[in-house]
Image (cartoon, helix red, strand yellow):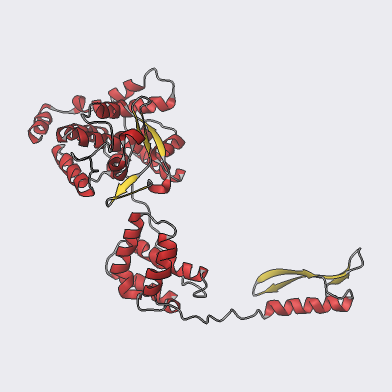
């Protein structure tokens, strides 16, 4: 026994024990100030650890996965936590395509680790990619963990995600980017401005469509403030719910300045003032890529080009993180790693733009703005004729 009497003449106990391979330190003071009472209290404490009380029995009827997913979980987690429209849409699609048929009829306490393992095996057999499978399993995990938090079930099964490496960033090189800008000019001043917003300021396509003249564009300070984005005709806060302010390059400034519109409402808009749709944006970029004689890629490639080129020019990563609106610096460092792995000689026009500028941020903005001048020096006569003919 480990009973002892302290300086205050009170009996206590203190003991270290190992239970199920885990070391536990016990101590306490008995109600009666005697050695026998301290020894008895120690024995009772050890017995309590060796024989813990059983978990409380769940008396309520456990709902099915379908009832829980579309009921309490949807109201309190998806709606109550203000999931973005893209997240809501993704959850609906994943449930309809995968979870409803496989798990919808099962009660939550019937969804065990082997059941999840079978679902994962079925997704592999259907030849889904590892990232897509992880997305499906994540939508399984959240409702079950929330059911544990709400004490609807005692524990959630192990999910077991695949380890997935992020794909390497795909960006336009200097010549391709300049050719893309040339082709965008032929598409109209609004789409040329849209391409500049993505490639000269790193805006996501949803942010391009939601950008407003009065609220977000400062032509005197030559800055943009990203306050919102539009996706699937729904306008919300930007990704990560982080607003950011970005300096304009000279190319972007000139593109906005030459737009023959009243500076009210959306910057890139239809004739009636409405924002461009997802279909319009995607279809127009495909057309611009073909006019430039380039492979068809998505809008995000322009954002990747902005980040990669800035990293090649030696931007401070924390400054680039702010400009791109990343929540974590490791997202920004992906561009730095790509720039280091695919180092390029800087075009003369880009190099010349940096001469004599001591402010590091201003120097990077000037270098980014000079990329549009690269094409005339690289483009052959035949390429120029082909571009004019295509336009």
Q: Which residue is outermost to the left?
A: 389
What residue is rendered at 87% in x and 76% in y? 32
In this rendering, the answer to whether 376 lies above or below 72 is above
The quarter of the image holding the N terminus is: bottom right
Does the image show residue 188?
Answer: yes
In this rendering, the answer to whether 78 lies above or below 227 is below
The quarter of the image holding the C terminus is: top left
| Between 148 and 345, the one nearer to me in the picture | 148
What residue is rendered at 11% in x and 26% in y? 381
What residue is rendered at 21% in x and 46% in y? 282
Q: Is residue 39 left or right of residue 384?
A: right
Q: Is residue 340 left or right of residue 179?
A: right
Q: Quadrant of residue 14 in the image?
A: bottom right
Q: How many marks?
A: 0
Residue 265 place in picture, x, y as percent? 28, 37
Residue 162 place in picture, x, y as percent? 39, 62
Q: Is residue 265 left or right of residue 49?
A: left
Q: Quadrant of residue 190 in the image?
A: top left
Residue 349 place in picture, x, y as percent? 28, 23
| Between 151 and 380, the one nearer to me in the picture | 151
What residue is rendered at 20% in x and 49% in y? 279
Does the image show residue 124?
Answer: no
Residue 121 place in picture, x, y as percent? 34, 71
| Between 51 and 167, the one nearer to me in the picture | 51
Q: Which residue is outermost to the top?
A: 356
């Amino acid at each position: 026994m480990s009973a002892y009497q302290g300086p205050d003449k009170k009996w206590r106990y203190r003991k270290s024990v190992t239970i199920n391979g885990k070391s536990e330190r016990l101590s306490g003071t008995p109600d009666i100030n005697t050695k026998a009472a301290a020894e008895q209290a120690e024995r009772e404490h050890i017995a309590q650890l060796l024989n813990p009380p059983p978990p409380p029995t769940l008396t309520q009827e456990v709902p099915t996965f379908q009832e829980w997913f579309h009921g309490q979980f949807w109201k309190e987690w998806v709606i109550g936590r203000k999931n973005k429209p893209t997240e809501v849409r993704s959850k609906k699609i994943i449930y309809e395509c995968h979870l409803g048929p496989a798990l919808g009829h099962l009660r939550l306490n019937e969804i065990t680790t082997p059941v999840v393992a079978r679902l994962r095996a079925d997704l592999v057999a259907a030849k889904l990619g590892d990232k897509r499978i992880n997305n499906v399993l994540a939508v399984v995990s959240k409702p079950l963990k929330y059911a544990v938090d709400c004490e609807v079930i005692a524990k959630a099964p192990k999910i077991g995600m695949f380890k997935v490496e992020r794909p390497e960033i795909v960006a336009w090189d200097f010549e391709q980017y300049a050719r893309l800008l040339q082709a965008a000019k032929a598409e109209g001043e609004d789409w040329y401005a849209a391409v500049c917003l993505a490639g000269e300021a790193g805006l996501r396509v949803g942010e391009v469509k939601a950008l407003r003249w009065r609220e977000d564009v400062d032509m005197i300070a030559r800055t943009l403030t990203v306050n919102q984005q539009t996706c699937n005709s729904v306008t919300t806060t930007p990704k990560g719910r982080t607003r950011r302010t970005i300096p304009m390059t000279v190319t972007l400034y000139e593109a906005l300045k030459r737009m023959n519109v009243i500076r009210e409402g959306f910057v890139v808009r239809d004739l009636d003032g409405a924002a461009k749709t997802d279909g319009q944006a995607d279809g127009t970029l495909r057309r611009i890529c073909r006019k430039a004689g380039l492979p068809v890629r998505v809008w995000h490639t322009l954002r990747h080009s902005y980040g990669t080129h800035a990293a090649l020019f030696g931007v401070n990563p924390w400054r680039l993180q702010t400009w791109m609106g990343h929540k974590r610096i490791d997202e920004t460092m992906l561009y730095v790693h790509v720039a280091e792995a695919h180092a390029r000689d800087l075009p003369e026009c880009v190099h010349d733009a940096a001469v004599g500028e001591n402010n590091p941020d201003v120097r990077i903005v000037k270098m980014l703005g000079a990329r549009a001048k690269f094409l005339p020096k690289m483009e052959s006569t035949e390429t120029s004729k082909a571009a004019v003919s295509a336009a």
